[in-house]
Amino acid sequence: MSRRFLALSLIAVASLAMPLAGQSPDPAARVLVNTDKQGLALEGHDPVAFFTEARAVKGSPAPTATWQGATYRFTSAGHRDAFAAEPAKYAPAFGGYCAYGASRGYAASVEIDTWQIVDGRLILNYSQSVKRRFNADRAGYLQKADREWPGVIAKEGRPAGD
């Protein structure tokens, strides 16, 4: 193989790859996060506090962080920084919607006092009675919710860039 042919081949491959490097994420990507009309997630509760303080604690108007188009409030800059470093670790599962509802293929509102940490995930449910039903087969419902949630996002989500 000649050097000229090799050089031209490399240039051709590089020119094909260049447009891909500047492309934005999949335009069909969607997100679904349970927020109020102002875009506030978890009714203003600090997502990190569920893990570190084992209770629901209202965050302050500042500091905040935005992830997947939702605004999260925190009790301290340290909590905000922990969230910013690993948002998927602290953000509620199923976009903060009811885990039982997700297992049934829909997004349902939640009551904050139904929160629990399950396998390192913040889980919420519609009500205490739904939480009891969910906990009767927690592993089964979580498996179903994980399977159904992408379809819920596809149906009810909004484009990720909004």
Image (cartoon, helix red, strand yellow):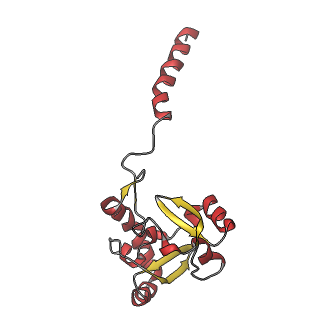
Query: In the depicted view, which residue is nearer to us: 26 or 65?
Result: 65
Query: Dividing the image into 4 quarters, which one contains the N terminus?
Result: top right
* Residue 41 position within the rendered picture, expressed as x and y whole percent measured from the top left: 48, 69
> Which quarter of the figure has residue 75?
bottom right
> Which quarter of the figure has residue 136?
bottom left
Q: Farthest residue in the right direction?
A: 78
Look at 32% across and 71% down and name the residue there. 106
Count how many numbered circles sit on residues in the image: 0
Query: In the depicted view, which residue is nearer to us: 130 or 13?
Result: 130
* Residue 98 position within the rendered picture, expressed as x and y whole percent measured from the top left: 41, 76
Q: Farthest residue in the front direction?
A: 61
Query: In the depicted view, which residue is nearer to us: 3 or 59?
Result: 59
Q: Is residue 81 left or right of residue 148?
A: right
> Which quarter of the figure has residue 86?
bottom right
Look at 51% across and 14% down and name the residue there. 8
Look at 57% across and 72% down and name the residue there. 47
Q: Farthest residue in the left direction?
A: 155
Look at 54% across and 75% down and name the residue there. 45
* Residue 93 position within the rendered picture, expressed as x and y whole percent measured from the top left: 48, 70
* Residue 116 position within the rendered picture, expressed as x and y whole percent measured from the top left: 53, 81
